């Protein structure tokens, strides 16, 4: 009774794949000497590789010597199996690479309101780029307050969010996007419209609408020094109240520009009453691999880098 030969121990490693590729070439070229040119390694290195493979498999794969090269019966079977394995690896590589050309699935993005008028259209341009690369990608945009976006990204309901950076959360990655300037505005019907100079005492007596959402410390300092008598949950609400002619309010300059251009709003003492807010794209740390999200982040970073160079 023949003793049992030990099976190939452990999992197939990268080194095993390399040895099998050498073995395939040797078989297809009919020997070590003919395989040298294709493999670009010496005959001695090929001989060592074949010996290593035979030792790894505990099988005699071929006869080599003065009589020439020939496969053993076991060698023929291993050759057939190696073709199946190497073919499967090549198919896997092809299929994975094809995913990059055939993106399919959803990209769920949460965005703070009224960023569409931001001149640096990083988010918009990157969405256009990923849609061009993957026509079957379904883009879902949700306009919600920053705190809700952060929670939704953390629990996986959103892949990516665009929020003001008030306080960085440890579970999120931040990709800087915009620096947004906000100024204090009044409407053309307000008593301060067109008036200069404006004393600080008079400014403090005016009704002001405050943002009822998280603000930077710089923004809060402005509100604390003014007479806040109304609030709004978003920028559109602030604009509504400013346009009544009864309130002052802070708006991003890019958002207020259309009303300023029409003569319906103007900034009030902008050299004193303005602040800057940083915006970032957020993703969850330790997220599962997602080809669509990773592709979008690459395109977003490329868009940012290109604009900076320009």
Image: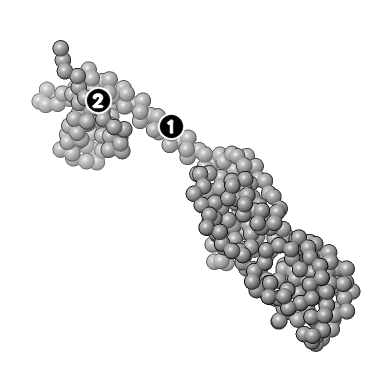
Query: Nearest the camera: 145 or 257?
Result: 145
Quarter holding residue 279: bottom right
Q: Residues within 10 Å of mark 2 (few under 14, many from 20)?
A: few
**Side (left or right) of 228 relative to 133:** right
Q: Is residue 103 above or below residue 216?
A: above
SS label for mark 2: loop
Task: Quadrant for residue 75, please give it.
Answer: top left
Per the image, the residue denoted by label 1 is 91
Separation of disc 1 and disc 2 at Cα? 26 Å
- Asked if residue 57 is positioned above or below residue 281 in the image, the reply reads above
**Residue depicted at x 77% and y 85%:** 200
In front: mark 1 or mark 2?
2
Asked if residue 82 lies left or right of residue 173, the reply is: left
The C terminus: image quadrant: bottom right
Can residue 167 be spotted in the picture?
Answer: yes
- Can see residue 125? no
Please provide percent x and percent y for residue 220: 68, 72
Give 291 or 72, whichever is nearer the viewer. Answer: 291
Could you say which quadrant of the image residue 269 lies in? Answer: bottom right
Read off the residue under disc 2.
7
- How far across and down, in percent of the image, does residue 45 sit? 18, 39
Expressed as whole percent of the image width and height from the top left, the position of residue 309 reads: 54, 66
Q: Quadrant of the N terminus?
A: top left
**At x 14% / y 26%, what residue is drawn?**
64
Q: Residue at x 26, y 20 (%)?
A: 76
Q: Is residue 19 above or below residue 150?
A: above
Q: Residue at coordinates 73% horizontally, 78% vertically from top-left?
A: 225
Q: Earlier in the sequence, mark 1 or mark 2?
A: 2
């Amino acid at each position: 009774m023949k003793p049992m030969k030990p099976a190939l121990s452990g999992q197939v490693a990268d080194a095993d794949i390399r040895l099998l590729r050498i073995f395939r070439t040797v078989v297809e070229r009919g020997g070590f000497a003919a395989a040298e040119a294709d493999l670009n390694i010496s005959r001695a290195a090929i001989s060592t590789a074949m010996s290593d493979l035979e030792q790894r498999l505990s099988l005699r794969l071929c006869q080599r010597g003065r009589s020439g090269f020939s496969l053993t019966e076991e060698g023929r079977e291993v050759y057939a199996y190696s073709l199946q394995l190497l073919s499967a690896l090549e198919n896997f590589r092809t299929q994975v690479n094809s995913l990059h050309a055939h993106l399919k699935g959803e990209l769920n993005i949460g965005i703070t309101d009224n960023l569409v008028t931001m001149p640096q259209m990083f988010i918009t341009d990157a969405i256009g780029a990923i849609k061009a690369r993957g026509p079957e990608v379904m883009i879902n945009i949700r306009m919600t307050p920053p705190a809700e976006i952060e929670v939704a990204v953390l629990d996986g309901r959103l892949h990516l969010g665009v929020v003001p950076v008030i306080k960085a959360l440890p579970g999120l990655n931040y990709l800087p996007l915009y620096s947004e300037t906000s100024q204090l505005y009044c409407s053309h019907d307000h008593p301060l419209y067109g008036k200069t100079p404006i004393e600080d005492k008079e400014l403090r007596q005016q009704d002001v609408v405050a943002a009822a959402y998280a603000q930077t410390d710089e923004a809060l300092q402005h509100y604390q020094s003014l007479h806040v008598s109304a609030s709004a949950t978003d920028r559109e609400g602030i604009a509504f109240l400013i346009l009544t002619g009864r309130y002052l309010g802070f708006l991003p300059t890019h958002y207020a520009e259309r009303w300023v251009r029409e003569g319906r709003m103007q900034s009030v003492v902008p050299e004193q009453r303005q602040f800057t807010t940083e915006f970032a794209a957020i993703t969850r740390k330790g997220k599962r691999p997602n080809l669509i999200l990773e592709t979008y982040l690459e395109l977003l970073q490329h868009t940012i880098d290109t604009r900076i160079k320009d």
